[in-house]
């Protein structure tokens, strides 16, 4: 396949639809996960699908390794609130049955499904039913003829396998597919997807395969997927974590997208890392705020900062925030104090202000007397020697004013006199020019 200079300003040129979810072609990056239950256990599988949908999954994938899973799939695709992908390995007959069962998409790996002929059977049925496919490779399942290259250049091996898969789809005159190319290695995943994105126009599914536990897997996924997404590469993502709670994968995916400002969903929590100035139980406060924010769908920013010194300045942009001291704290909005409250009431009072904001049609309710008391408290608790963001802003403003004044003086020295010197054009060394000096 040639490598045309595809436009990589958006994630991909082509777009497919998994159920009602557009993938690629500039559509928002779709979040997907995979159920951890036995698919044939219909009740457990549907419970988990509803849980991940509530957490924000756009698409869910289910494993279909047995005939009884196909039977359950027929009901799952009808009952599911989000599109369902059937995950098939080794047995192309199951892929055919999954398409017939109404799966919104089928995932196959052409390298382990039985060869081009059997891939062709799946593609032919997918064409007739209008079912999109996910095709691609993992670092652990490369074709045999690329095993040696994998040791020499694993990135090139991955890209070669993916391109061969795309070429097979095109020979079969099939374009309703997305491509996945994943590795357990973060650098290899980044490098290979960067190369592939410039060589094909089809949507890309991103993931770090077998990423690890909720802790390590989340970090690896954030680094790998975040890097690619920041480059404009990737149309749908799945976080692969070793947990039975699939909704945790969804939450991590959303945090990555929110951090990159690619999508919004629910509040954004800002919290300081704490330091020696901390005088209250911020761990408990942050945990409680985070939990209570789950009840809100609006993408407001809420800040929890640990001291009065940097409280407002560090998160001046936050819609609402709290900053605490030993016995008292302060609630503020958009950098302006609202009121001071006892430290043990900070969380409750914060959410009272948030609720008042929504009850009034998203207008901050401000009591000027309470705000004035909060300002006095802030001034009394501020470290006189600390270079707070507020003080830094004041210093910068003063410096800017001085520079502006100095510029004004210099400009007045350089400006021409109000009564310009008259020049006798007749004796000018440039007499006869086509403009007059007068």
Image (spheres, grey):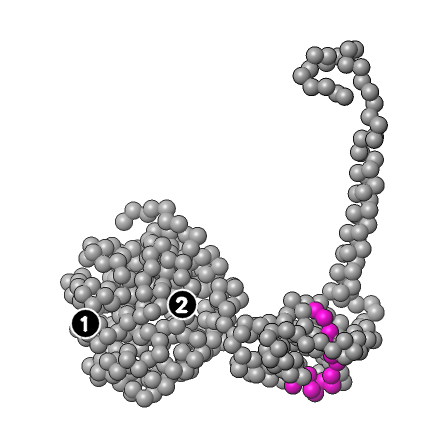
Classify residue 406 as left or right of residue 430. Answer: right
Give the camera-side residue of 204 and 75. 75
Q: Which residues are magenta?
A: 335-348
Classify residue 171 as left or right of residue 399. Answer: left
Of the two numbered discs 1 and 2 in the rendering, the one whose residue sits closer to the viewer: 2
Q: Is residue 133 above or below residue 69?
A: above
Residue where numbered disc 2 is placed: 30
Query: Looking at the rendered structure, which numbered label has been put on residue 398?
Result: none
Considering the image in quadrants, where does the C terminus appear? top right
Q: Is residue 174 above or below residue 320?
A: above
Q: CA distance from mark 1 to mark 2?
A: 25 Å
Q: Earlier in the sequence, mark 1 or mark 2?
A: 2
Q: In the rendered image, which quarter is residue 322 located in?
A: bottom right
Q: Position of residue 39 (x, y in %)?
A: 29, 83
The reply to whether the magenta stretch includes residue 396 is no
Residue in the image at 79% along x and 38% along y: 411
Query: Looking at the rendered structure, which numbered label has been put on residue 96?
Result: 1
Res 389 seen here: yes
Q: In the rendered image, which quarter is residue 349 located in?
A: bottom right
Classify residue 31 as left or right of residue 278. Answer: left
Residue in the image at 31% along x and 75% along y: 84
Q: Position of residue 18 (x, y in %)?
A: 32, 68
Q: Secondary structure at mark 1?
A: helix
Q: Position of residue 242 (x, y in %)?
A: 41, 78
Label 1 environment density (alpha carbons within 10 Å; few <14, some 14–19, many ≥20): some
Classify residue 70 as left or right of residue 37. Answer: left
Res 279 seen here: no
Give the camera-side residue of 221 and 142. 221
Q: Secondary structure at mark 2?
A: strand
Give the camera-side residue of 18 and 241. 18
Q: Position of residue 38 (x, y in %)?
A: 30, 84
């Amino acid at each position: 396949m040639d490598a045309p200079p595809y436009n990589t300003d958006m994630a991909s040129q082509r777009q497919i639809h998994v159920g009602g979810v557009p993938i690629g072609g500039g559509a928002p990056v779709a979040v997907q996960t995979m159920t951890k239950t036995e698919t044939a256990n219909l009740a457990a599988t549907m419970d988990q699908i509803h849980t991940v949908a509530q957490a924000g999954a756009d698409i869910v994938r289910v494993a279909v390794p047995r005939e009884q899973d196909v039977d359950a799939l027929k009901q799952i695709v009808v009952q599911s609130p989000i599109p369902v992908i059937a995950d098939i390995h080794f047995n192309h007959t199951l892929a055919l049955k999954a398409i017939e069962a109404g799966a919104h998409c089928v995932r196959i790996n052409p390298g382990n499904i039985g060869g081009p002929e059997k891939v062709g059977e799946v593609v032919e049925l997918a064409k007739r039913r209008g079912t999109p496919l996910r095709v691609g490779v993992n670092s652990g399942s490369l074709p045999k003829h690329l095993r040696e290259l994998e040791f020499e250049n694993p990135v090139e091996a991955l890209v070669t396998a993916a391109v061969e898969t795309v070429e097979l789809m095109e020979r079969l005159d099939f374009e309703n597919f997305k491509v996945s190319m994943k590795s357990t290695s973060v650098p290899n995943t980044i490098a290979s997807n960067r190369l592939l994105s410039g060589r094909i126009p089809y949507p890309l599914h991103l993931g770090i395969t077998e990423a690890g536990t909720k802790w390590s897997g989340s970090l690896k996924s954030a680094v790998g997927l975040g890097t690619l997404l920041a480059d404009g590469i990737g149309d749908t993502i799945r976080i692969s974590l070793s947990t039975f709670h699939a909704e945790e994968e969804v939450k991590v995916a959303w945090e990555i997208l929110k951090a990159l400002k690619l999508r919004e969903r629910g509040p954004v929590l800002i919290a300081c890392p704490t330091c020696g100035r901390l005088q209250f139980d911020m761990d408990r406060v942050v945990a409680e705020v985070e939990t209570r924010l789950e009840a809100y769908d609006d993408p407001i920013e809420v800040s929890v900062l640990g001291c009065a010194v940097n409280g407002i300045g560090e998160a001046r942009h936050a819609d609402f925030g709290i900053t605490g001291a030993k016995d008292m704290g302060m609630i503020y909005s958009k950098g302006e104090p609202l009121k001071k409250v006892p430290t043990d009431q900070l969380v409750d009072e914060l959410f009272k202000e948030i609720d008042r904001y929504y009850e009034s049609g998203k207008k901050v309710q401000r009591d000027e007397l309470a705000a004035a008391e909060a300002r006095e408290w802030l001034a009394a608790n501020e470290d006189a020697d600390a270079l707070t963001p507020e003080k830094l802003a004041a210093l910068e403003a003063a410096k800017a004013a001085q520079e502006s004044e100095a510029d004004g003086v210099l400009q007045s020295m350089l400006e021409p006199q109000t009564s310009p010197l008259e020049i006798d054009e007749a004796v000018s060394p440039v007499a006869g020019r086509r403009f007059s000096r007068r």
